Amino acid sequence: MANRHTIILMQTSQNRASRTFMDYGSVSQAMDGLCGLYERKLKELNPAIRNITYDIGDLYNFMDGLTDLSALVYDHNIQAYLPYDREWIKQRTFQHLKKMAR
């Protein structure tokens, strides 16, 4: 799924005004973006802690805490975006982090 334009759609609260999107050049960049979003949130909540660590369960809890989370990934073969749900995003994030740890 390299170099497939990816749009992350999310809603952070029940308020419809909290809907937003982030777009990336690839699925991998999108997963990095979600991890970065979570890391910024952790730093915001824990400003006095220099080195914040977390595990995949913490990241999943963050994703599950969002009112809505989905992805649209461009498929060159059909020239359209394919929708993916929160569970797919969690699986792809895990695969991405596992690959980065090697």
Image: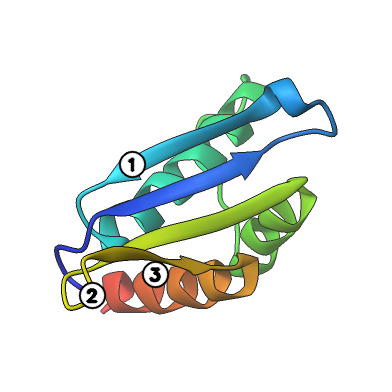
Q: CA distance from mark 2 to mark 3?
A: 29 Å
Query: Do tag 1 and tag 3 residues touch (Cβ < 8 Å)?
Result: no
Q: In this rendering, does residue 51 appear at all? A: no
In the image, 9: left or right of 12? left
The tag earlier along the polypeptide, 1 or 3, is 1
As rendered, which of 59 and 23 lies closer to the eye? 23
SS class, disc 3? helix
Dots 2 and 3: beta carbons under 8 Å? no
Q: Quadrant of residue 67?
A: top right
Query: At numbered mark 2, what does the secondary structure look like: helix, strand or loop?
Result: loop
In the drawing, does residue 84 fall left or right of residue 102? right
Q: Quadrant of residue 85?
A: bottom right
Foreground tag (1 vs 2)? 2
Three-letter amino acid code at the position of disc 2: Ile
Residue occupying image coordinates x 62% and y 22%? 44
Residue denoted by label 2: 78
Establish if 20 lies above or below 70.
Answer: above
Answer whether residue 70 is visible to the viewer in this image: yes
Residue 78 percent across, percent down from the top left: 23, 75
Q: Which residue is mark 1?
A: 23
Quadrant occupied by the C terminus: bottom left
Between the C-alphas of marks 1 and 3, the distance is: 19 Å
The percent position of residue 89, horizontal first and vertical second, equals 52, 67
The residue that label 3 is drawn on is 97
Q: Residue at image x 71%, y 21%?
A: 17
Report crowding for label 3: few under 14, some 14 to 19, many 20 or more residues within 10 A (C-alpha).
some
Mark 1 to mark 2 CA distance (whole Å): 20 Å
